[in-house]
């Protein structure tokens, strides 16, 4: 089941005292999928998938995915570490698309705030198979 499908934009400013995604504006197409809704009898390690594609306006999430994930998880009530974070990368020279996965882990806690680290990697075949129906 699709929870969100549309353009997600940020302006790089903070008026509420919280850290923004980053201090520069950006725009991504984003689709959030509840993977467990189709098969409620199956227990998923990653219950949700967030598929992203840069709209070419503003900054990339490459270095800010943990901030983005924190904000999206709060807005849509999903767990960061139980979500598959995927980005579609257009390779205009080779005229194909690659899918990268962000592994986001909690490194430590300071008070009630969690600090996350992220590492990007190529999607593996079973992840590609899982995401294929949801990618346009």
Image (tube, grey):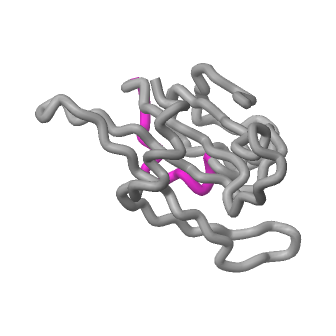
In the rendered image of this protein, does residue 39 appear above or below residue 102?
above
Q: Which residues are magenta?
A: 57-68
Closer to us: 44 or 72: 44
Give the x, y percent position of residue 98: 31, 43
Indicate the quadrant where residue 49 lies: top right
Residue 32 visible in the snapshot: yes
Magenta residue check for 59: yes
Query: The N terminus lies in which quarter of the figure?
Result: top right
Magenta residue check for 101: no
In the rendered image of this protein, does residue 30 appear above or below residue 124?
above
Give the x, y percent position of residue 18: 76, 48
Residue farthest toward the left in the current orientation of the protein: 93
In the rendered image of this protein, does residue 92 appear above or below residue 75?
above
Residue at image point 66% right, 53% down: 83
Residue farthest toward the right in the current orientation of the protein: 112
Give the x, y percent position of residue 119: 46, 65
Indicate the quadrant where residue 76 lies: top right
Closer to us: 26 or 84: 84
Residue 17 visible in the snapshot: no
In the rendered image of this protein, does residue 123 appear above or below residue 74?
below
Give the x, y percent position of residue 57: 41, 24
């Amino acid at each position: 089941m699709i929870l969100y499908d549309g353009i997600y934009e940020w302006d790089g400013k903070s008026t509420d005292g919280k850290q923004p995604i980053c201090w520069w504006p950006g725009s991504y197409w984003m689709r959030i999928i509840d993977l467990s809704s189709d098969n409620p009898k199956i227990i998923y390690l990653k219950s949700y998938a967030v598929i992203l594609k840069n709209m070419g306006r503003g900054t990339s999430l490459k270095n800010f995915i943990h901030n983005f994930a924190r904000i999206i998880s709060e807005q849509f009530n999903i767990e960061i570490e139980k979500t598959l974070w995927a980005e579609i990368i257009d390779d205009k020279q080779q005229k194909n698309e690659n899918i990268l996965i962000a592994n986001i882990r909690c490194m430590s806690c300071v008070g009630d705030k969690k600090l996350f680290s992220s590492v990007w990697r190529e999607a593996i075949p079973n992840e590609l198979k899982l995401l294929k129906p949801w990618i346009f």
